Image: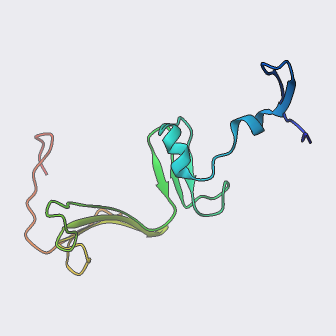
Amino acid sequence: MALNNDDLLVVQQISSGELKKLAVGDLVGSVNNLQEVTDEGNTTDNDILIGGTLPAAPAISLNANGSAELVSGAITTRANNSGSTSNSARIDIVQETDDFAAILVYSDAAKTNETARINGDGSIIAAGPLEAESIDGGTF
Protein backbone atom coordinates (compact mmCIF):
# COMPACT_ATOMS: atom_id res chain seq x y z
CA MET A 1 0.00 0.00 0.00
CA ALA A 2 1.35 3.38 -1.01
CA LEU A 3 0.57 6.52 0.94
CA ASN A 4 0.64 10.03 -0.45
CA ASN A 5 1.44 13.19 1.47
CA ASP A 6 -1.42 14.21 3.77
CA ASP A 7 -3.07 10.74 3.61
CA LEU A 8 -4.65 9.58 6.83
CA LEU A 9 -3.91 5.96 7.69
CA VAL A 10 -6.59 3.78 9.28
CA VAL A 11 -5.77 0.50 10.98
CA GLN A 12 -8.66 -1.92 11.53
CA GLN A 13 -8.58 -5.24 13.34
CA ILE A 14 -11.04 -7.63 11.73
CA SER A 15 -12.72 -10.56 13.49
CA SER A 16 -9.90 -12.98 12.64
CA GLY A 17 -7.49 -10.71 14.47
CA GLU A 18 -5.80 -9.63 11.26
CA LEU A 19 -4.88 -5.96 10.99
CA LYS A 20 -5.98 -4.16 7.84
CA LYS A 21 -4.33 -0.88 6.86
CA LEU A 22 -6.08 1.55 4.53
CA ALA A 23 -5.91 5.19 3.63
CA VAL A 24 -9.13 7.05 4.50
CA GLY A 25 -9.62 7.84 0.80
CA ASP A 26 -9.68 4.12 0.05
CA LEU A 27 -12.40 3.62 2.66
CA VAL A 28 -14.55 6.53 1.58
CA GLY A 29 -14.19 6.01 -2.15
CA SER A 30 -14.67 8.72 -4.69
CA VAL A 31 -17.59 10.53 -6.21
CA ASN A 32 -17.61 10.46 -9.99
CA ASN A 33 -20.34 12.93 -10.84
CA LEU A 34 -22.85 15.46 -9.50
CA GLN A 35 -25.64 12.87 -9.43
CA GLU A 36 -23.65 10.78 -6.94
CA VAL A 37 -23.05 13.87 -4.81
CA THR A 38 -26.73 14.83 -4.69
CA ASP A 39 -27.72 11.24 -3.98
CA GLU A 40 -25.82 11.70 -0.70
CA GLY A 41 -27.48 15.06 0.04
CA ASN A 42 -28.47 18.14 -1.92
CA THR A 43 -27.45 21.01 0.34
CA THR A 44 -24.28 23.02 0.81
CA ASP A 45 -23.21 26.15 2.62
CA ASN A 46 -20.46 26.76 0.06
CA ASP A 47 -20.54 28.95 -3.03
CA ILE A 48 -20.97 27.02 -6.29
CA LEU A 49 -18.81 28.04 -9.27
CA ILE A 50 -19.81 26.95 -12.78
CA GLY A 51 -17.92 27.20 -16.07
CA GLY A 52 -15.48 29.86 -17.09
CA THR A 53 -11.92 29.63 -15.77
CA LEU A 54 -12.23 27.99 -12.37
CA PRO A 55 -11.83 28.94 -9.63
CA ALA A 56 -10.62 32.46 -10.47
CA ALA A 57 -13.20 33.54 -13.07
CA PRO A 58 -16.37 31.42 -13.10
CA ALA A 59 -19.08 32.06 -15.70
CA ILE A 60 -21.75 31.62 -12.99
CA SER A 61 -21.44 32.03 -9.22
CA LEU A 62 -24.27 30.80 -7.00
CA ASN A 63 -23.33 32.25 -3.64
CA ALA A 64 -24.20 30.85 -0.23
CA ASN A 65 -25.45 34.31 0.83
CA GLY A 66 -28.28 34.03 -1.73
CA SER A 67 -26.75 36.19 -4.45
CA ALA A 68 -25.86 35.01 -7.94
CA GLU A 69 -23.63 36.45 -10.63
CA LEU A 70 -23.54 35.69 -14.34
CA VAL A 71 -20.58 36.90 -16.34
CA SER A 72 -22.48 37.08 -19.63
CA GLY A 73 -25.77 36.03 -21.07
CA ALA A 74 -29.24 36.60 -19.68
CA ILE A 75 -31.32 35.60 -16.70
CA THR A 76 -34.55 34.31 -18.19
CA THR A 77 -37.91 33.61 -16.64
CA ARG A 78 -41.01 32.39 -18.41
CA ALA A 79 -44.35 30.86 -17.55
CA ASN A 80 -45.06 27.40 -18.81
CA ASN A 81 -48.64 26.64 -17.90
CA SER A 82 -49.54 24.80 -21.09
CA GLY A 83 -46.68 22.28 -21.05
CA SER A 84 -45.10 23.94 -24.10
CA THR A 85 -42.66 26.84 -24.01
CA SER A 86 -43.35 27.85 -27.63
CA ASN A 87 -46.04 30.40 -26.72
CA SER A 88 -44.81 31.47 -23.30
CA ALA A 89 -44.03 35.10 -22.55
CA ARG A 90 -40.46 35.70 -21.45
CA ILE A 91 -38.46 38.21 -19.41
CA ASP A 92 -34.69 38.54 -19.85
CA ILE A 93 -32.33 40.53 -17.63
CA VAL A 94 -29.23 41.18 -19.70
CA GLN A 95 -25.91 42.95 -19.48
CA GLU A 96 -24.18 42.70 -22.82
CA THR A 97 -21.42 45.24 -22.09
CA ASP A 98 -20.32 47.44 -19.20
CA ASP A 99 -22.43 50.22 -20.71
CA PHE A 100 -25.57 48.24 -21.58
CA ALA A 101 -27.97 46.53 -19.21
CA ALA A 102 -31.71 46.08 -19.67
CA ILE A 103 -34.83 44.21 -18.67
CA LEU A 104 -36.48 42.92 -21.83
CA VAL A 105 -40.06 41.62 -22.03
CA TYR A 106 -41.20 39.44 -24.91
CA SER A 107 -44.66 38.14 -25.73
CA ASP A 108 -43.16 34.87 -26.98
CA ALA A 109 -40.42 32.44 -25.93
CA ALA A 110 -38.62 32.78 -29.28
CA LYS A 111 -37.90 36.48 -28.55
CA THR A 112 -39.37 37.64 -31.85
CA ASN A 113 -41.75 40.19 -30.30
CA GLU A 114 -40.16 42.51 -27.74
CA THR A 115 -43.02 44.32 -25.99
CA ALA A 116 -41.16 46.35 -23.38
CA ARG A 117 -37.64 47.36 -22.39
CA ILE A 118 -36.25 49.11 -19.33
CA ASN A 119 -32.72 50.27 -20.07
CA GLY A 120 -29.97 50.73 -17.50
CA ASP A 121 -30.18 54.49 -17.93
CA GLY A 122 -33.83 54.41 -16.76
CA SER A 123 -35.42 54.92 -20.16
CA ILE A 124 -38.44 52.78 -21.00
CA ILE A 125 -39.65 51.62 -24.40
CA ALA A 126 -43.04 49.92 -24.63
CA ALA A 127 -45.22 48.54 -27.43
CA GLY A 128 -48.36 49.83 -25.71
CA PRO A 129 -49.38 52.84 -23.61
CA LEU A 130 -47.59 53.46 -20.29
CA GLU A 131 -49.52 54.18 -17.11
CA ALA A 132 -47.67 55.64 -14.15
CA GLU A 133 -48.62 55.31 -10.52
CA SER A 134 -46.70 56.25 -7.40
CA ILE A 135 -45.86 53.26 -5.21
CA ASP A 136 -45.67 55.33 -2.02
CA GLY A 137 -48.57 57.69 -2.72
CA GLY A 138 -46.30 60.55 -3.79
CA THR A 139 -46.55 62.61 -6.94
CA PHE A 140 -44.57 62.50 -10.18
**Residue 115: x %, y % from top left:** 18, 73
**Residue 58: x %, y % from top left:** 59, 58
Number of marks: 0
* Residue 79 left/right relative to 67: left
* Residue 21 left/right relative to 67: right
- Display coloring: rainbow
Q: Quadrant of the N terminus?
A: top right
Tell me what residue is drawn at x 49 percent, y 37 percent: 41
Instruction: Write down the quadrant of residue 19 in the picture.
Output: top right
On the question of residue 23 being in view, the answer is yes
**Residue 78: x %, y % from top left:** 24, 62
The residue closer to the viewer here, 1 or 127, is 1
Position of residue 71 relative to residue 133, above or below, is below
Tell me what residue is drawn at x 68 percent, y 45 percent: 30
**Residue 75: x %, y % from top left:** 37, 61
Tell me what residue is drawn at x 85 percent, y 35 percent: 7
Instruction: Write down the quadrant of residue 82 in the picture.
Output: bottom left
